Amino acid sequence: MFDFAGKTLFLTGANGGISRAVAQTFFDLGANCVLTDLDAAGVEAFARTLDPSGARVLATRQDAADPQDADRALALVKERFGVLDFLVTSAGLYRARQVAEMDDAYWRQGIAVNLDGVFYTCRRAIPLFAEGAAIVNLASMAGHRGSFAHADYSAAKGAVLSFSRSLAIELAPRVRVNAVSPGLIDTPMVRGLMDAKGAALLEQTPMKRLGTVEEIARVVAFLCSDWASFVTGETVHVNGGLYIAS
């Protein structure tokens, strides 16, 4: 088991299904947690369930598409914990609309949250990183294979993968950077999709089930741990075999 005692995690989109599991996993491993989300009340309530004392968990509002919010939220890391050991970007916006029906504002919003927000947070975190720190950017299977009626989302996630590889080159050897691409995970975000296409999708999945949020969180924790000390610039697929790529 990994020991993250005395280490600090900064997690965006922290009130989502996968993100909550990431926060719980890192907290259980001993880490301090700075949790941000657009839903301030929701993330603050979640933080209290993790750590009612507030000694190790701090929650605040962050609009991923707003660079000033990234400045403000990361300033709290320095003020409260001094340095940053783990950054996990998980804020996202997932909606359904075909390209022919998208207007420019719709496209721009999807890119702003799912791609620009990753840049804003990673860029502003760089001066805070401790030696041996790690970034894990949450991407998606959609970033590799595309997704019907989710072109803005899949385009942004594909760019996050490329951005992560470039950042890994730039920040080495002090900071490692990797990505995780979840497949169909049992969260509210995919339940509508499963209602419509679930039987067919599970038939195409060798593991014949949805993944769990804990299975994603454990991979994220591994990539942040010393056990992955020679892993950087990589993407780990966690999709039960639905999309197999090397």
Image (spheres, rainbow, N blue to C red):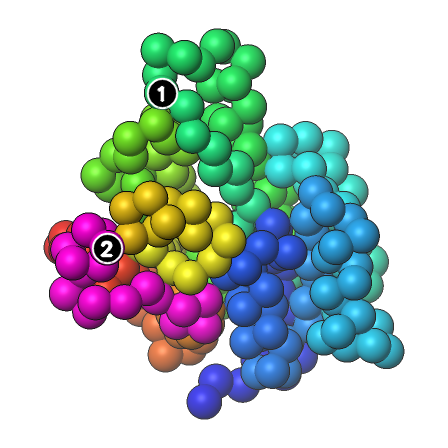
The answer to whether residue 108 is left or right of residue 127 is left
Place of residue 87 in the rendered image (x, y in percent of width and height, measured from the top left): 55, 57
Position of the N terminus by quadrant: bottom left
Residue 140 visible? The answer is no
Q: Earlier in the sequence, mark 2 or mark 1?
A: 1
Place of residue 40 in the rendered image (x, y in percent of width and height, measured from the top left): 78, 49
Numbered mark located on residue 199 in the image: 2
Place of residue 200 in the rendered image (x, y in percent of width and height, measured from the top left): 19, 51
List the residue tagged with mark 1. 98
Residue at left 29%, top 30%?
148
Residue numbers of the magenta segment: 199-215
Q: Secondary structure at mark 1?
A: loop
Measured along the vertical axis of the image, is residue 51 above or below residue 102? Answer: below
Badge 1 density bin: few <14, some 14–19, many ≥20, Cα 10 Å: few
The answer to whether residue 109 is left or right of residue 227 is right
Q: Amino acid at mark 1?
A: Gln
